[in-house]
Amino acid sequence: MKGEFHSPSLEHEFFPGQVNPDSLWFDEFLGGAFALDRLMLIRILMILVVTAFFFFAMRKPKLIPSGVQNFAELALDFVRIHIAEDILGKKEGRRFLPIIAAIFFTVLAVNLPTIIPFLNISPSARIGLPLVLALVAYVAFIYAGVKRHGFGKFVKSSLIIPGLPTFLHFLVAPIEFFSTFVLRPLTLTIRLMANMLAGHLILVMLFSATNFFFWQLNGWTLLAGGTILFAIAFSFFELMVIFLQAYIFALLAAVYIELSLHADDH
């Protein structure tokens, strides 16, 4: 048997404005305003899957859960106990649980296609989705601070550190502004996107190397066995990364909300 190797390209997958028009769906509807490429379709698919899962699990909740409801409640309890309440306390944790849980399960769901056969790509590796999720967390922690302290006091408490000499405020306040209102959503976005993009690239290279050694370099066929083992092992590692990225994103969102709630406790 003789195969053919095609070098992988990210040009039409990850970079906005570089999508191949031939790979779009609904591109003729309303002038292409609702055109969808493969990544967008996978995003929609995974959001529908996680929504359907919780709808099915909680459609008829029982006092003593079992089956799918039990698994769904265990997942929600993990977010509630180990993220929301652990960072925010019971009262505020329950208050902000819906948004923290939504972030956690959205990130988890859209990261999973990285290792799902025939999907094999992470929608989080394109900046749009991580940016939207970071903006949701951004709005949440600003809302928490403004609701607790009022807009003026929240901004002042976030920028002004008590006890500093007056002249230092001209140096420290811009740094605090950049750190709080610019760097937080930026780092949330880049962390998620970069980790998932890097994982995808490594998997692409490992499976591409397997293809290359097996089909193109017949004298090196045995190396294909080694690269496929590395690819499988890295797929399990990537599964851990998928969970960790969801956990870290939701955890940092909770931390930022907590910092806003106690902005006056510098």
Image (cartoon, grey):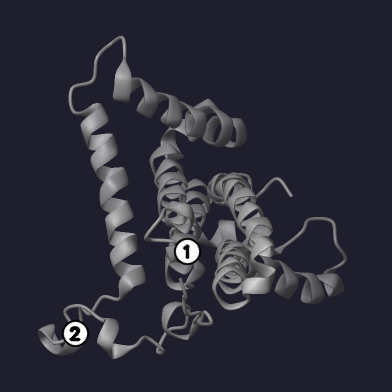
User: Which quadrant of the structure image shows residue 212?
Assistant: bottom right
Rendered location of residue 41, percent (x, y): 28, 66
Dot placed on the residue nearer the N-terminal end, 1 or 2: 2
Residue 38 placement (x, y as % from top left): 32, 71
Q: Which mark is residue 27?
A: 2
For disc 2, the neighbor class at 10 Å (few under 14, some 14 to 19, many from 20) is some
Q: Assign a secondary structure to mark 2.
A: loop
Inspect the image, locate mark 2, and give the three-letter code of the amino acid beneath it. Answer: Asp
Q: Please tell me which residue lies in front, 200 or 83.
A: 200
Q: Is residue 28 above or below residue 152?
A: below
* Classed neighbour count for the residue bearing mark 1: other residues with Cα under 10 Å, few (<14), some (14–19), many (≥20): many
Which residue is nearer to you in this view: 112 or 221?
A: 221
Q: Quadrant of residue 186?
A: bottom right
Does the image show residue 252? no
- Left or right? Give the position of 63 relative to 258: left
**Residue pushed farthest left?**
29
Compare residues 83 and 199 and report the one nearer the observer. Answer: 199
Q: Amino acid at mark 1?
A: Ser
Q: Can you identify the residue that label 1 sits on?
A: 124
Residue 163 is situated, as x and y percent measured from the top left of the image, at 84, 56
- Residue shown at 43% from the left, 41% from the top: 101
Q: Is residue 181 above or below residue 247?
A: below
Q: Quadrant of residue 173?
A: bottom right
Q: Position of residue 245 (x, y in %)?
A: 57, 51
- Badge 1 marks a residue whose secondary structure is helix
